[in-house]
Image (tube, rainbow, N blue to C red):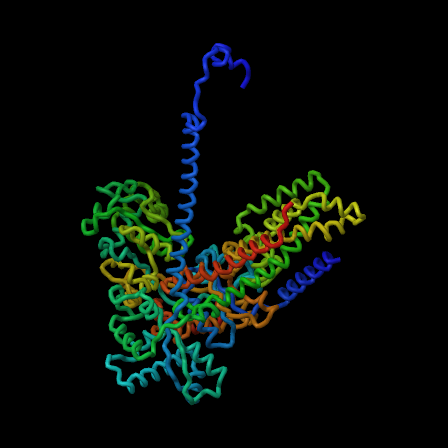
Amino acid sequence: MKFTTLVSATAVAVASTAFVGAAQARDQVQVAGSSTVLPYASIVAEAFGENTDFPIPVVESGGSSAGLKRFCEGVGENTIDVANASRKIREKEIKACAEAGVKDIIEVRIGYDGIVFASQKDGPAFTAFQPADIFNALGAKVLKDGELVDNPYNNWAEFNADLPDVGIAAFIPGTKHGTREVFEEKVLAVGCEATGALQAMIDSGMSEDDAEDACIDVRTDGKSTDIDGDYTETLARIDSNPNGIGVFGLAFYENNTDKLKVATMGDVAPNTESIASGEYPVSRPLFFYVKKAHIGVIPGLKEYAQFFTADEIAGPSGPLAQYGLVADPELAATQASIAAEETMK
Amino acid sequence: MTDTTLSPETSPAAAGEPVKSKSLYALDDLTRKRNASEKRFKLYGLGAVLIGVFFLVVLATAIISQGIPAFTRTIVEVEFTLTQEQYDAAEKELFKTKAYEQFFIGALQGQLEESGMSVPFDAAAIERIVGKTGGTIREYFKANPGALGAPAAFELAASSRVDGYSNGRVTRETLTDSRFLEKSDLDIVDALVEAGIIKTVFNWNFITGADSGVDNPGGAGIGASVIGSFFMMLVVLFLSLPIGVAASIYLEEFAPQNRFTDMIEVNISNLAAVPSIVFGILGLAVFIQFMHLPQSAPLVGGLVLTLMTLPTIIISTRASLKAVPPSIRDAALGVGASKMQSIFHHVLPLAMPGILTGTIIGLAQALGETAPLLLIGMVGFVARGYPDGFITGFIEPNSAMPAQIYTWAARADYAFYEKAWGGIIVLLVFLLTMNILAVILRRRFERRW
């Protein structure tokens, strides 16, 4: 019977593929996490495949939190080996990891990334910002005439006459991005303190923690838009909005200097030098986390981590710096800790 | 109309008044009004069609004009000699490809100096003009160790901005000096173009190659992900066609009409409307976390897409089985065939064109699907190139065409954006071919009663 042979042939095909799939050990390193680290990881992955006998690792994106969540799902071939993150792993993530059996994690800092504010090339001149300006424009509650009020500003010039007289329209990374945390910490919180809003909140009877949390609240009246996608989405928004100002990574900006105009922060222009020296205030370290239990099981995992942090790759003259990563001055310590497979405490 | 509304007083015939004689050729008001409204409706319809055509034209122009640059690439064509010593030295390095690149740049610089180029240049400028070349050079000499020491002709990718300069994306006006390219480098590029060293050729690598790192748009190709899509479609075809057809035959021909089969029917229709991302989550939970199938593998992608395609195939198969007239079944049963014989010998062959059309359209839908692939690890940087064999094609990590397009569109370098549009053209070619195939099958084999 034609039909029965068809069915049995299919059953055999399914069974054999499933069997082969289950029996085959994974031979490539599997990475997921921050979309900020993704470009660097993809450069390294390609070079790793070209320069060693190991296959090219698979690098997925999806955001630091999503990546760390998958990382903490457990130990075994069906979980990822490396999580990229544009922020440090949190206490509660380490705890979640430990509960799932991922106890030994190696932390690797690969370098620094600058966060820049940029607007359309032909738009008004947003060329000088202080964190206070950003806080006044985007904070949920700001200080006006000595009083704490819901953000009343519609226009940049209303609180700083040096800024252009155009409506506020900001495109900032959404909460699933690690970049958002740095933006909150290094721009909003700093601006909150500088404008005196933090003090005013504490004076009004808030506890210090609550006041700090209130400082990083972003206004929700539509003047500020969360971008959950990649920087390309922010770029598209800026492209169609001459008054818009967006938050980008330094590398992304440097790749698109023909479309974007960058703003200084605290009178310092963002570039690899000013970020390495710490003069430019808004930068953050980038990390990846390695599952120690997978070293020796997944071929090439340790070699990948070592290759990533080698002087030739992550050093100041390597391809990562060429693309826009700010090299870590303490790279040697990182290399030593990977060689010794030092785990986090 | 009922009699009550026709009162005798107002009825003209009853009143004895002569009926207003009117030519049938002269249109009365009501007819004119009806005609006008018909005309208006036709215009609305035409307008709707025109709007649709307009958007189609805009879309097609956008895709073609943006995607064409992906099919050309700017290359640096040079004869280059690598000595055995250089080869050994490079192989000792950790970052071997960089070493090859340096040898190549040194050799090119030497050649240009010899040829007495009038435009001033230095090694740094050449490095900015030439793209990432080390990988290609290393691969060549590893495969042909005999070529060491003799000049070999290379066609190597120029950097992304030089590529943009030759296809018009980058101009002297828009270029800002950066470590990627400086304005003065364009003079060197012009001179090299005149010397025939830099030229624009058809980008075969885009059609046959694999994805490349974000700093190497010149090396990116969609070929490997076409293969990934192909293996996924194989899985989808060989699972969803038999399962879908078997399920439809049972439901349509054998199943008793009861509450249970009603429920199944309703659920199949519901399943067809489930968003594809849901199947992705299911795939992650069941196939990867529970069944331990490999991540990023076309096998898992195919299984997930099978779930998505099954309802489509079941619905279209049942429709085409229903369309076979009962007289065929009755005739078969009448001459003594069993129920199974009547279905497999008579009904199924007649329903086949419809089933195949439904299958092809289901496959085309699955081919363009990205969302479920996000969750099973087929989106991202999956640059594995071609699988070694047929079986490994299913389980080795690979991307798929729509996933590759999505990945490229999110990259910082604009050259990848062009690649994404180019990828859309390739994907559309596949989709159109499948749809045309479906139309041809229907036209040629469909029987009407």
Relative image position of residue B180 (x, y in whole percent)? 31, 70
Q: In percent of the image, x 31 and y 50: which residue is there?
A: A170
Left or right? Give the position of B266 relative to B200.
right
Which one is in front, B449 or B347?
Answer: B449
Left or right? Give the position of B134 relative to B196.
right
For the N terminus of chain A, which image quadrant?
Answer: bottom right
Residue A215 visible in image: yes
Residue A290 visible in image: no
Left or right? Give the position of A230 relative to A125.
right
Relative image position of residue B356 (x, y in whole percent)? 61, 54
Q: Outermost residue, left direction?
A: A161
Position of residue B102 relative to residue B291, above or below, is below
Q: In percent of the image, x 45 and y 62: which residue is there?
A: B423
Which one is in front, B445 or B17?
Answer: B17
Which one is in front, B333 or B107?
Answer: B333
Which one is in front, B116 or A61?
Answer: B116
Q: Please state the total of marks drawn on the protein image.
A: 0
Q: Outermost residue, right direction?
A: B336
Relative image position of residue B263 (x, y in whole percent)? 65, 41
Q: In percent of the image, x 47 and y 14: which residue is there?
A: B12
Relative image position of residue A12 (x, y in whole percent)? 69, 62
